[in-house]
Image (cartoon, grey):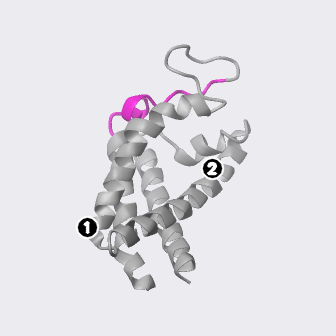
């Protein structure tokens, strides 16, 4: 039952995170579209990429919620502030490590050294995602803080 509860709150937290990221893009804070970036790893079709990307993002959210649950168990329970700390670490890792590795694993993303080609036309995010706008790091970081806050607040009730 604990894993089902965790999956529910992971899905909920991911819906909130995805909504915040989409609002950030719609309001011009960032040009980054996370579902498109994820989905375009699977297909060159731009419309399907968004659909596949949403599914992949939600699956990632559930998987990360389980990782948060494991961390909370090692940390003797979840609290809102522990969730914020994990969200901070999660966001910082994404911005400093994962996002810079994305061009090396994404089949349709150019890299900073070679630029675009016929097959690799998606702009690389660059350090902290700054190629997608100066406020991109803020959008991603705040979204993941809230993701962690939600999990830290609601996962203790799963016991």
| Measured Cα–Cα span from mark 2 to mark 1 | 30 Å
Foreground of the two, 114 or 69: 69
Q: Which residue is mark 2?
A: 53
Q: Give the farthest residue toward the front.
A: 74
Q: Is residue 111 left or right of residue 132?
A: right
Foreground of the two, 109 or 72: 72
* Residue 31 included in the magenta stretch of the image: no
Numbered badge on residue 81: 1
Which image quarter: residue 103?
top right
* Residue located at (66% from left, 39% from top): 41
From the viewer's perspective, tell me whether residue 97 is left or right of residue 6.
left
- Closest to the camera, between mark 2 and mark 1, is 1
Give the numbered dot on residue 31. none
> What secondary structure predominates along the stretch shown in magenta?
loop
- Check disc 2: other Cα within 10 Å, few if <14, some if 14-19, many if 20+: many
Residue sitting at x 25%, y 67% = 81
Return the residue found at the far top: 114
* Residue 108 % position (x, y): 65, 29
Answer yes or no: do the residues labelled 2 and 1 have beta carbons within 8 Å?
A: no
Q: Count the labels in the image.
A: 2
In the rendering, at what x and y percent does residue 116 appear?
60, 18
Horizontal and vertical percent position of residue 150:
38, 69
143 above or below 110?
Answer: below
Q: Position of residue 63 (x, y in %)?
A: 55, 61
For the N terminus, the image quarter is: bottom right
Which residue: 39% across, 77% down?
154
Q: Dot 2: what SS?
A: helix
Residue segment shown in magenta? 120-135
Residue 29 or residue 81, whichever sits in front:
81
């Amino acid at each position: 039952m604990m894993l089902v509860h965790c999956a529910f709150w992971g899905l909920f937290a991911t819906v909130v995170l995805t909504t915040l990221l989409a609002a950030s893009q719609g309001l011009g804070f960032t040009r980054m579209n996370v579902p498109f970036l994820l989905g375009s790893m699977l297909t060159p079709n731009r419309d399907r990429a968004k659909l596949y990307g949403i599914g992949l993002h939600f699956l990632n959210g559930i998987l990360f919620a389980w990782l948060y649950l494991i961390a909370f168990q090692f940390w003797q329970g979840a609290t809102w502030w522990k969730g914020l700390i994990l969200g901070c670490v999660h966001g910082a890792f994404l911005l400093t490590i994962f996002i810079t590795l994305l061009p090396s694993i994404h089949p349709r993303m150019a890299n900073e050294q070679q630029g675009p080609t016929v097959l690799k036309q998606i702009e690389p995010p660059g350090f902290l995602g700054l190629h997608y706008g100066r406020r991109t790091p803020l959008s991603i970081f705040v979204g993941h803080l809230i993701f962690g806050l939600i999990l830290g607040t609601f996962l203790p009730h799963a016991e």
